[in-house]
Image (cartoon, grey):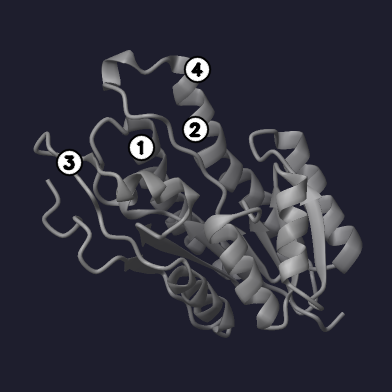
Amino acid sequence: MTTKVALVTGASSGIGRASALALARDGYAVVLAGRRKEQLEETARQAGNAETLVVPTDVGDAAQIKALFARTRERFGRLDVLFNNAGMGLPAVPMETLTVEQWKQVVDVNLTAPFLCTQEAIKIMKEQKPRGGRIINNGSISAHAPRPHSVAYTSTKHAITGLTKSTSLDCRQYDIACGQIDIGNAATEMTERMAKGVPQANGTTMVEPRMHVDNVAKTISYMASLPLDANVQFVTVMATTMPFVGRG
C-alpha cells in the first residue's frame, strides 16, 4: 500500500470539509467521518477523483469510533494522518446554570472523542509498515483564552493541549508526531453569529472579524506534509484583527 491515508472527523462541513479537501488535493485517500451522511457524501463529491471513504460516525459514541477505525484499517490497511477536528459548543449561559448533562455532552465530544480516536490511531500507526504517522488536534483560541459563559468548551479545549503534549511524549517511540492547530474565527457555519455580534469580556457586544476557512486547510496541509522527524507542535491561525491578543 503506497497511498497515504488521512482521517478527518467532522468532515461534513466547515473546517473539517475544507481540510479533507486540501488533503485529498495533496494525494491522500481520505476517510470522511461525521454524523451527517448526506453532507459527508457532498464532501466526497467535491473531492472529485480523489479516493474517499464515507463513514457516518457519532464521535460521542465509543463503539462508533472503534467501528470507524476498523473500517479504515479494513479498507486501506494503514493510517498516516488523523485530524481530530469534530467538536461542539453550547449557547452562552452563566456557569452556575450549566447542567451536568450539558457539561458531560461537551466533554464527551470535545475531549473523550479525540482521546479515543487517538488511541485507535496509535494502534494502527505503531504496527503498520512503514511505521508511524501524524495526529493533529483542533485546539482553538479557547485553548488559551475563554469567551464569556463558555466554561465547558474552554475547559475541554485547554485539556486538548494536555492531550497533544501527552501524545507527543508517549508516541515518539512509535514515530508518531502530534501537533495542535488553534483556530480563531474561521468563516464557517459555527461562526456566523460573530457577523451579528458576540458578547465580550467587558459586557459589550461586538461584531468580530473572520477569515476564510481555506487558511486553516492550508495549514493542515502543511502540517501533514512534513516528514515524521519534524513537527509543528502548536500553531495559531486567526483573523488578524479579532480580539485575542489582549482579549478581556
Q: Which quarter shows the C terminus? A: top left
Element on which disc 1 rests: helix
For residue 155, the mark is 1
Kindly report which numbered mark, 3 or 4, lies closer to the viewer in this rendering.
3
Q: Which amino acid type corresponds to the residue marked 1 in the rendered image? A: Ser
Q: Of the two numbered discs 3 and 1 on the same chain, state the one appearing first in sequence.
A: 1
Discs 1, 4 touching: Cβ within 8 Å: no
Q: Which amino acid type corresponds to the residue marked 3 in the rendered image? A: Gln
Q: Of the two numbered discs 3 and 4 on the same chain, state the one appearing first in sequence.
A: 4
Q: Residue furthest front?
A: 196
* Residue identifier under label 2: 107
Discs 1, 2 touching: Cβ within 8 Å: yes
Where residue 27 appears, as percent x and y from the top left, is 72, 83
Discs 3, 4 touching: Cβ within 8 Å: no
* Residue identifier under label 4: 101
- Identify the residue at image location x=36%, y=44%: 193
Q: Which amino acid type corresponds to the residue marked 2 in the rendered image? A: Val
Q: Which quarter shows the N terminus? A: bottom right
